[in-house]
Image (cartoon, rainbow, N blue to C red):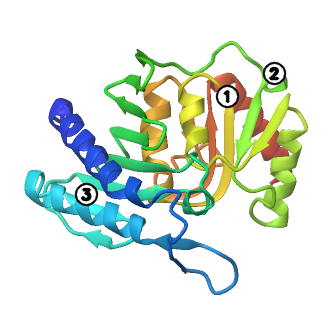
Amino acid sequence: MTYDLDALNYVANVLADEARAAILPYFRKGNLTTENKMRNGYDPVTIADRAAEEVMRRVLACLRPNDAIVGEEFGITEGSSGLTWVLDPIDGTRGFVAGTPTWGVLIAVGPKSGPILGIIDQPYIGERFVGCGGVATLFGPHDTKIIRTRSGRKLSDAILFTTFPEIGTLQDRAAFEAVAAQTQLVRYGMDCYAYALVAAGQIDLVIETGLNNYDIQAPIALIEAAGGIVTDWCGKPVHQGGRVIAAANFEIHKEVLQIMGHLE
């Protein structure tokens, strides 16, 4: 089936614009209140998360009433078109609460087989990364340009990111550390912005566990449009979430799978 990518791209950018307007009044405000969604741990949600998803849902109800919606804060709205919008109004709410500009709005759309368009939008610094139709573009305050992932690099030259040093289970952590030991540089804590950096050709690899579909569908569409590859730790599709490898090129991806395969 073919889709009107221009129409979907238009709607996705309207969603990102509206989410920006809903979120920015709350960022770096000292009186921001949070609720914790975890009994053991800290997984905050703020009024900004909910306001952004609410406004995006209102836009979709007007412009794409037959499409389904999956959102982090308000769950599933069924549709009849065969397309589903997957929304994370603030990916990286911990960073948002802390005042770091590495959180982002994640917007993806696609059929059951996976996303065909994805946006990572960072409202505070004004960068929007869009992947659609095999082309990835950065719209920023300094310029607008086509972006591509890095090629011709080995794992030993790679820059690797993950959100938490204490990644996943003990077995997951052992696998991550085995890969990390073969890279040039490891950094932590960038949330969705790390995936944008893969697409932009700045870094080579993101490895994470425990992701939901709304965490990963926008990064998948963006990175694949930029020339990279995103799978689970066994090399299979990961658009429904789980353990994720996002690699700048197939060579590095293959090296990572070989290391992890020896540890399974």
Q: Tell me which residue sits at (88%, 33%) in the image.
A: 182
| Label 2 sits on residue | 157
Pick whichever of labels 1 and 3 is earlier in the sequence. 3
- Which amino acid type corresponds to the residue marked 3 in the rendered image? Met
Q: Tell me which residue sits at (71%, 27%) in the image.
A: 252
Q: Name the image quarter holding residue 12.
A: top left
What x and y, as percent, mark residue 13? Answer: 26, 39
Front residue of this view, candidates 1 and 119: 119
| Label 1 sits on residue | 203
Circles 3, 2 touching at the beta carbon (< 8 Å)? no
Dot in front, 1 or 3: 3
95 to 113, vertically: above or below: below
What x and y, as percent, mark residue 240? Answer: 47, 57
Front residue of this view, candidates 213 and 238: 213
- Residue 112 in view (yes/no): no
Q: Tell me which residue sits at (53%, 28%) in the image.
A: 199
Check disc 3 and report its element: helix, strand or loop: helix
Dot in front, 3 or 2: 3
Left or right relative to 42: residue 91 = left
Q: Residues within 10 Å of mark 2 (few under 14, many from 20)?
A: some
Q: Residues within 10 Å of mark 3 (few under 14, many from 20)?
A: many
* Residue 262 marker: none
What x and y, as percent, mark residue 93? Answer: 54, 62
Check disc 1 and report its element: helix, strand or loop: loop
Left or right relative to 208: residue 180 = right
Check disc 2 and report its element: helix, strand or loop: helix
Spatial CA span between label 3 and label 2: 40 Å
| Label 3 sits on residue | 56
